[in-house]
Image (cartoon, grey):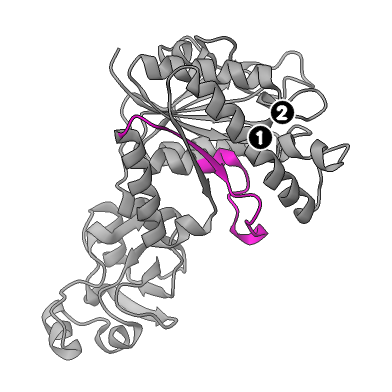
Amino acid sequence: MAKKRIVVKIGSSSLTNINGGLSNVKLREHVDALARLKKLGHEVILISSGAVAAGFTDIGYSVRPVTIAGKQAAAAVGQGQLLRGYTEGFKRHGVVAAQLLLTRQNFLYKEQYQNAHATLSELLKRKVTPIINENDSVAVDELTFGDNDMLSALVSGLVHADLLIILTDINGIYDQNPRTHPNAQRYNFLHKIDDHLVNGTSEAGSKVGTGGMKSKVEAARTALRLGVKVFIGSGTGEEKLVDILVGEGDGTYIGGRSLASMNNSKQWLALHSIPSGKIEIDQGAEIAIVRNGKSLLPAGVTNIMGNFKINDVVEVVNLEGQLIGKGSVNFSSHQLLEIKGLSSTEAMFKANSDQKVVIHRDYWVNH
């Protein structure tokens, strides 16, 4: 079997007991399965929920707290329990584990994004298993991933994983909710995720978790966009992840044979960067950059909105105002107001710049 880089996401419902506390039996089974992948030579990154679920009973809550302060307090207690369980479990297999706590902010700023990639790359090179969770204790509501499903998709893209495995308590994606429709049919394989499928899945999560099947389907769509295949389903025993890897998993496989990978700079640009303004372009420029993979030239620019500097990220819209992509600009908004519609030669002279293009195709992503 070829050696692969695999991201495994484990949700709260797969880690906790009936009362919401951390289940050592479940955690041990997951560790044994993860360690089995390691012994076969695969690189493994774990995205683990469960901090809030593991901690809330110890600080006096009878059910999972709903307030931000309550959840953050529970996470502060539970994260230590969760990591201790994983660390001790992996140590029995001779595997070293490391903890990374991330917030959305770590992805929004390019330097932090690059640092996260460098840290994960070094850990994998050293044969260490990273254990990643959102930093629930300090994350603010506007800067969260929403749930660890999306975090797992973004991490799988960041490390250019071969496969993202999302373990859950339902064995795959169904055409209807199998809990309420006994005749629901499971999708064993999906080539892609379309809007109909996303809109038809449930948002409801378990009583100890935040993500329902809809969040998993949305995460799968993001992973596919980043060039990563996905499995969503369940399993038991030490061999469950190996079974999934060889195509015998109990769930839904998503993604065709070959997916186009997206380099890290374009991943950051597409999914994390914050635009500083907008550029409107004509139809000819739209065809050139969207269909033909060309760079955006000053001649195609028709209007400028907002104030931005050289190297800032901007949105690009067509004459109907529809968003068509984002890119990093070689001219400021003030320069573009002066050179829009001009040839590259005229624009370079008037702006006193050595740049021929407004946005180079290497720093552009389609919407």
Marks 1,2: beta carbons within 8 A: yes
Left or right: 128 as drawn, with respect to 70: left
Mark yes or no: residue 295 visible. Answer: yes
Q: Residue placed at 15% from the left, 74% from the top?
A: 356
Q: Amino acid at mark 1?
A: Gln
The answer to whether 133 is drawn above or below residue 42 in the figure is below
Residue behind mark 2: 22
Q: Position of residue 266 (x, y in %)?
A: 33, 53
Of the numbered discs 1 and 2, the one sitting upstream in the chain is: 2
| Residue 63: quadrant of the picture | top right
Q: Position of residue 100 (x, y in %)?
A: 49, 44
Left or right: 156 as drawn, with respect to 55: left
Residue situated in front as seen by the camera: 320 or 303: 303
Residue 139 among those drawn in magenta:
yes
Range drawn in magenta: 126-151
| Residue 339: quadrant of the picture | bottom left
Q: Residue placed at 51% from the left, 16% from the top?
A: 33
Q: Amino acid at mark 2?
A: Leu
Residue behind mark 1: 81
Q: Residue placed at 31% from the left, 54% from the top?
A: 265
Secondary structure of the residue carrying tag 2 is loop
Number of numbered discs visible in the structure rendering? 2
Mark yes or no: residue 188 visible. Answer: no
Viewer-nearest of discs 1 and 2: 1
Q: Could you classify mark 2 by the number of other residues whose Cα lies within 10 Å: few (under 14), some (14-19), or many (20 or more)?
A: many
Q: Position of residue 241 (x, y in %)?
A: 48, 16
